[in-house]
Amino acid sequence: MALGHTLRNHTFTDGFSDTRILRLASMATEVTFATDEVIIESGQRSEFFYLISEGSAAVELRAPLFAVCVQALGPNQVCGWSSLLDDQNTLFQVRAREQVKALRFDGARLAELCRFDAELGHEFYRRTLKTVFGRVKATEEKFAEMCGMKVRGQNAASGTHGG
């Protein structure tokens, strides 16, 4: 089972039981994105949660006249955390910097599983909050950099869970 293998080896799901890995694998779809393809479009209804297994992507803060790369994501990182929230629009755009392979989960189904299996839900949301924290930290550092401020610990936001 290739999806189960990918899940077992992904940092985000490290330590999950075989039963939980199989349950998650039954919900996953393997997807591929070409270089420069938009994975998540900012301002759109968030639907999918992704575990990146290969390649890299840019988390971008977009405005009508510009886009700023806030953070680079690679294998063993995640994106699409807002899909776990009810009726939430995305805040960032995620674009493939090179070919990206990922496992895609329907956010509503994943959130339902987390409600059904409270222990899994607790751990899944705890790990997701680390991702959200890292994304906020990366945005803060990018903003400081754009304002000409020296940023201490530039790599502090690059956690194993997609920061």
Image (cartoon, grey):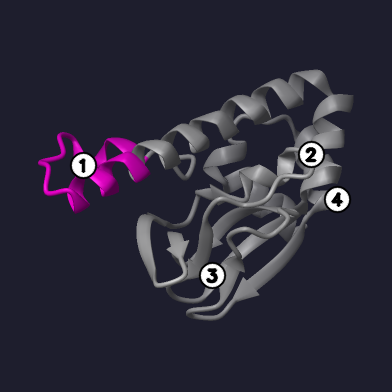
Q: Is residue 105 above or below residue 133?
A: below
Dot 2 or dot 4, earlier in sequence: 4
Q: Residues within 10 Å of mark 4 (few under 14, many from 20)?
A: few
Q: Residues within 10 Å of mark 1 (few under 14, many from 20)?
A: few
Dot 1 or dot 2, earlier in sequence: 2
User: What residue is pinned by disc 3?
Assistant: 100
Dot 3 or dot 1, earlier in sequence: 3
Foreground residue among 37 and 136: 136
Q: Measure the C-alpha gap from mark 3 to mark 1.
A: 25 Å
Of labels 3 and 4, the one closer to you: 3
Mark 2–mark 3 CB contact (< 8 Å): no
User: What residue is pinned by disc 1?
Assistant: 154
Secondary element under disc 3, as helix, strand or loop, is: strand
Secondary element under disc 1, as helix, strand or loop, is: helix
Q: Hey, what amino acid is under mark 1? A: Gln
Q: Residues within 10 Å of mark 3 (few under 14, many from 20)?
A: many
Residue displayed at 15% across by 34% down = 152
Q: Hey, what amino acid is under mark 3? A: Val
| Residue bounds of the magenta highlight | 139-158
Dot 2 or dot 3, earlier in sequence: 2
What quarter of the picture does the C terminus occupy? top left
User: What residue is pinned by disc 4?
Assistant: 26
